[in-house]
Amino acid sequence: MDFSIQLSAYYPDKNYGGDQLYRDMLEQAVLADRTGYDAVSITEHHLINILLMPAPLQFAVKIASVTARIKIMTSVVVLPLHDMRTYAGEVIVSDIFTDGRLMLGVGRGAFGFEMDRLGVPLDTSREKFNESLDVLTALLNEEEVSWDGKHYKFDKLTVMPRPVRAGGPPIMMAVLNPEGIYHCAKRGFHIQTTPLAGDHQLMLDQVSAFRRGKDELGEAGRDLTLSLSRVGFVANSAADRKVKIEAANEYYSRFDNVFTGPGIVEEGMIVPLPRQQTIEQLAESLLVCTPAEMIDKLGPYADAGVDRVIVNPNFGAAQSETLDCIQQFAEDVMPHFSDPGARVQTFSAAL
């Protein structure tokens, strides 16, 4: 099982500065490249101070310029916000500039505040996403493409330059529902998912759905991968874990506001709101624990057949602590999953 670090921007204080925020993320990427992570992951979000990255492809190119081998995944770019006729070219050029290390994770959007203000409300974004995805894949795979749909109508055109890799970079679909995972894998897409607050059975159902879709493709699906995202942090003591859980609870008081809540944002800053989930319930749902406990919690993912875990340690800790976490995770946790046959089978199925 491989691992990715999600370079997830959290910006609770404007005085910190966007320049410093992105320097921190770049420093994390360099460390992840040096310590053996398979990938780093970058989001796309606009107008808010959580997960903010208005220019993921530009940042991917910057990361590639200071790293040697690590893959760069978008987790995810929001296709309905872009015009595929120009975006396809941006993807091709970014794939060239990242030396073929780009993996294009795509989704329809998640935050109503953001999507409403950018003119693609969530209640219409799925329809536009589906058509945008079809247009994008056509433009990356074919020359002289014309289109007559609801959201796109254009005469024959060819995106230039043409992809160096056939069809452009691998496309990864962001899907939560197991049935959706099955259908996307069956179409030949890599999958990014997360159980969120779901139980162990949901994770197993997500993996099973992916495997069914992949298996039905036969040889054509041999290289498809399933990536699963979790918030996680290596804690060195019970007291340290308590501090990190409290920081995560503050983070989620903003996340919940825009994800499932009313979307109250003032001058770009998401207003923290009281949470329905207790801090004890949150602690159970996150991977914030000692290295030994982390190995135990990740074991069921490896045993189920997850190909890559995307770990997000960016929810409020200081940069120095986050770098230490990335380093310690690489040294104390990752080696246990580098050779599945060598792992000690003492993992608990409880998450």
Image (cartoon, grey):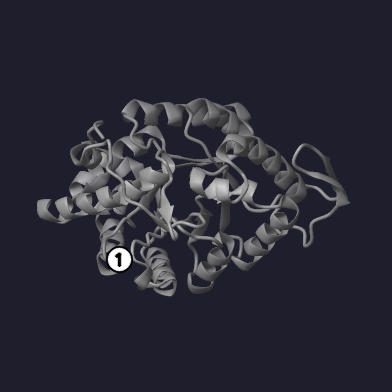
Q: Which residue is mark 1?
A: 323
Residue appearing at x 74%, y 41% in the figure: 151
Residue 164: image quadrant is bottom right
Closer-to-camera residue (301/199): 199
Q: Amino acid at mark 1?
A: Leu
Residue 198 in sight here: yes
User: Against 152, is 330 above or below?
Assistant: below
Q: Nearer the viewer, residue 101 or 172?
A: 172
Q: Give above or below for 188 relative to 312.
A: above
Instruction: Measuring from the top left, give residue 252's x and y in whole percent.
Output: 32, 47
Q: How far across and down, in percent of the image, does residue 272 sit? A: 32, 50
Locate residue 37 relative to residue 123 in the image: left or right.
Answer: left
Dot 1: few (<14), some (14–19), or many (≥20) neighbours within 10 Å? many
Residue 67 relative to residue 169: left or right: left
Q: 97 or 197, which is in the foreground?
A: 197
Q: In the picture, residue 277 is in which quadrant?
A: top left
Point 31% across, 35% down: residue: 300
Where residue 86 sits: x, y (%)?
Answer: 73, 57
225 is higher (above) or lower (below) than 97: above
